[in-house]
């Protein structure tokens, strides 16, 4: 996960370095590190950040394509986006940004007066390759389960299972947490529009699509916030660049009229003020870094690991568990279906009691560890567990069973 986070930081810096300045690129990276949840998710065993990192790579490759006009970058961009969507479907919020950039960036060049046929073919081709790549990857790895990819996000039971997580209230809180970022990004949009920096389409549309998606998503979790903070930091870099360019302009041409000085100094003062505000809002930056640095380390019981390791070493076998980290600790495999077991899917009915029973019948795992959802498992599943397995070890809410032979 940390490698994906580093890759995301590198691609953002590289994209901005080529189209703004080194100072703006470094500023965006710093803002990203200071943003809500990024540091914490960089060391968490979650798939969201790798997906967004690959989406960022896909957009960076589009910039490379426009700079070099080499088709290989366009193809690699589509493949990267397909991989991102396969890791986590949420990555498709970056697709509208890619499509609009391909359509509009070439048309905005001085020699172009409209969207050309070639531009349309590029855009459609990128979308087709992305779609084919997504299907092929899903087919190869057996991941084309629309009932688990689509239904859990739009099913009525899922959207009402966690009413305490009001999406709009949480989204408003996240926006308030990043007010200086938003204002700095606004300065950047104004500057980019003035200088016809078409690259800003990518973070601007990504940010807008993310906000719209999160506004309708239920439930909304803390790790969803990076969907808009990543493009927001990208946008903020243009605000930093506005200040940099103003200072350079003043230094190079000191003899300016009062109106010119007011206009140029205005952007610089705004950008500087918002950057300073980030250091103190909503709390001093050192306090925010300390808070965000508390990683979501995997929670597990050491005694449970010791019992599992002893048994697995003497008689290797797969482990059915709702906390896969146990299997990782003892170098054992788990049924692939357990990857989607979550409280949201269990309480909403996307994963039913009968499905869990079918998993046990299909794999007959010799080892079974129940820990996270012991209070919400159905009667049929628990009955099969008690009939076919013997309790080997129990601590707190963790229960370790072995198959009866």
Image (cartoon, rainbow, N blue to C red):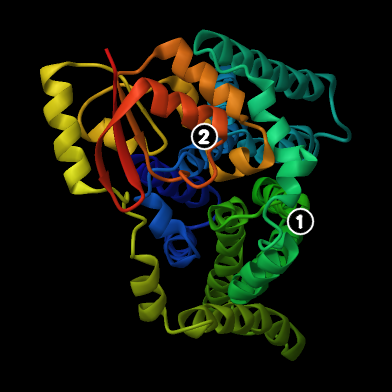
Q: Which label is found at residue 139?
A: none
Q: Residue furthest bottom?
A: 258
Residue under the point 50% across and 35% down: 54
Residue under the point 44% across and 43% down: 46
Q: Secondary structure at mark 2?
A: loop
Image coords of residue 82 (percent x, y): 59, 24
Q: Which residue is mark 2?
A: 341
Residue under the point 53% across and 53% down: 223
Q: Quadrant of the N terminus?
A: top left
* Dot placed on the residue nearer the N-terminal end, 1 or 2: 1
In front of the other: 89 or 312? 312
Residue 71 left/right relative to 306: right
Q: Report the mark closest to the observer, 1 or 2.
A: 2
Distance between mark 1 and mark 2 Cα atoms:
25 Å
Decide: is 152 above or below 376: above
In front of the other: 174 or 151? 151
The answer to which image quadrant residue 169 occupies is: bottom right
Instruction: Please tell me how crowded label 2 is: few (under 14), some (14-19), or many (20+) other residues with Cα within 10 Å.
Output: some
Instruction: Please tell me how crowded label 1 is: few (under 14), some (14-19), or many (20+) other residues with Cα within 10 Å.
Output: some
Q: Secondary structure at mark 1?
A: helix
Q: Quadrant of the C terminus?
A: top left
Q: Which residue is mark 1?
A: 215
Image coords of residue 343 (percent x, y): 55, 44
Residue under the point 71% across and 59% down: 163
- Residue 98 seen anywhere in this rendered image of the structure: no
Image coords of residue 219 (percent x, y): 67, 52
Decide: is 375 above or below 77: below
């Amino acid at each position: 996960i940390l490698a994906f986070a580093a890759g995301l930081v590198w691609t953002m810096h590289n994209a901005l370095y080529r189209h703004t300045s080194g100072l703006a690129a470094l500023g965006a990276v710093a803002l990203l590190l200071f943003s809500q949840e990024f540091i914490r998710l960089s060391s968490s065993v979650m798939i969201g950040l790798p997906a967004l990192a690959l989406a960022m790579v896909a957009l960076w490759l589009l910039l490379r394509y426009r700079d070099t006009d080499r088709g290989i970058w366009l193809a690699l961009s589509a493949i990267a986006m397909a991989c991102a969507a396969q890791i986590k479907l949420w990555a498709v919020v970056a697709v509208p940004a890619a499509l609009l950039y391909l359509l509009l960036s070439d048309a905005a060049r001085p020699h172009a007066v409209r969207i050309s046929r070639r531009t349309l073919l590029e855009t459609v081709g990128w979308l087709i390759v992305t779609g084919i790549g997504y299907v092929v990857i899903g087919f190869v790895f057996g991941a084309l389960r629309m009932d688990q990819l689509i239904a859990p996000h739009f099913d009525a039971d899922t959207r009402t299972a966690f009413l305490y997580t009001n999406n709009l209230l949480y989204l408003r809180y996240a926006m308030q947490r990043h007010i200086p970022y938003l204002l700095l990004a606004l300065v950047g949009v104004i500057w980019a529009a003035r200088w016809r920096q078409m690259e800003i389409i990518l973070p601007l549309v990504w940010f807008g699509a993310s906000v719209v998606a999160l506004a309708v998503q239920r439930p909304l979790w803390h790790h969803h916030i990076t969907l808009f903070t990543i493009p927001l930091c990208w946008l903020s870099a243009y605000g930093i660049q506005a200040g940099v360019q103003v200072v350079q302009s003043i230094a190079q041409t000191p003899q300016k009229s009062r109106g010119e000085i007011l206009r140029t100094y205005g952007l610089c003062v705004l950008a500087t003020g918002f950057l300073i505000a980030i250091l103190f809002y909503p709390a001093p930056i050192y306090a925010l870094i300390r808070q965000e640095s508390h990683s979501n380390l995997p929670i597990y019981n050491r005694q449970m690991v010791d019992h599992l390791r002893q048994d697995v070493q003497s008689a290797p076998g797969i482990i059915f568990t709702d906390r896969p980290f146990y299997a990782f600790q003892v170098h054992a495999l788990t049924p692939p279906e357990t990857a989607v077991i979550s409280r949201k899917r269990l309480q909403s009915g996307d994963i039913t009691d009968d499905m869990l029973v079918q998993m046990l019948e299909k794999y007959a795992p010799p080892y079974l560890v129940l820990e996270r959802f012991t209070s919400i498992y159905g009667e049929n599943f628990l009955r099969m567990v008690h009939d076919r397995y013997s309790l080997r070890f129990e601590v707190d809410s963790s229960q370790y069973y072995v198959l009866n032979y």
